[in-house]
Image: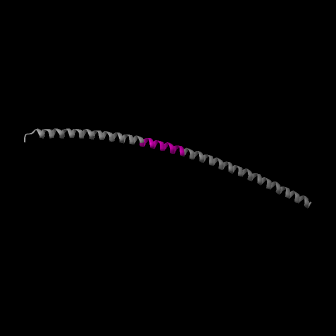
Amino acid sequence: MKTFSRILIFGAASLALAACSQTTKEETNEAANSAADDTAANAEKAGDAIEKAGENAGNAIEKAGDNAGKAIDEAGDKAAASAAEAKQNTGEAIEDVGKDMQKPK
């Protein structure tokens, strides 16, 4: 009877150990799957963030181009106005010199 009891206890212990091993295996699989899902979600978020950063950079470049275009247009307008004023002043100065030259001395 002692041998039978020992075999029975040994068998029960073996079954319990196998059950624990299976449970551990399943929990390990679940943890690995969860980690993989988390990693995939984080990768997707990172991709979205990169895409958004690219869009923001593109918008900033476009805005900088628009601002540069406006600044160039304004500078051109100011240069044209200054040239016209210089031309007017030069013409007036030439007229004044001509008048001075016509005056009797």
103 to the left or right of 82: left
Q: Where is residue 86 in the image (x, y as percent from the top left)?
A: 24, 41
Q: In which quarter of the image is the C terminus?
A: top left
Q: Which residue is drawn at 54% across and 45% down?
A: 50
The colouring scheme, among rainbow, by chain, secondary structure or one colour, is: one colour
Give 32 or 15, whichever is nearer the viewer: 32
Asked which quadrant contains residue 64, the reply is top left
Where residue 60 appears, x then y in whole percent? 45, 44
Along the viewing direction, whichever of 104 and 91 lies nearer the viewer? 104
User: What residue sits 51% from the left and 44% below the top?
Assistant: 54
The residue sitting at 27% across, 40% down in the picture is 83
Measuring 74% from the left and 53% from the top, which residue is drawn there? 24
Instruction: Locate residue 19 relative to residue 99 in the image: left or right.
Output: right
In the image, residue 54 lies in the stretch drawn in magenta: yes
Where residue 79 appears, as percent x and y from the top left, is 30, 41
Q: Main secondary structure of the magenta part?
A: helix
* Residue 33 horizontal/vertical position (percent): 68, 48
Q: Nearer the viewer, residue 27 or 66?
A: 66
What is the quadrant of the N terminus in the image?
A: bottom right
User: Closest to the observer: 27 or 36?
Assistant: 36
Residue found at the far left of this picture = 105
- Residue situated furthest bottom in the rendering: 2
Relative side of 96 to 34, left or right: left
Q: Which span of residues is magenta-colored?
A: 50-64
Q: Does the magenta stretch include residue 103?
A: no
Residue, far right? 1
- Count of marks overlaid on the render: 0
**Position of 52 compared to 12: left or right?**
left
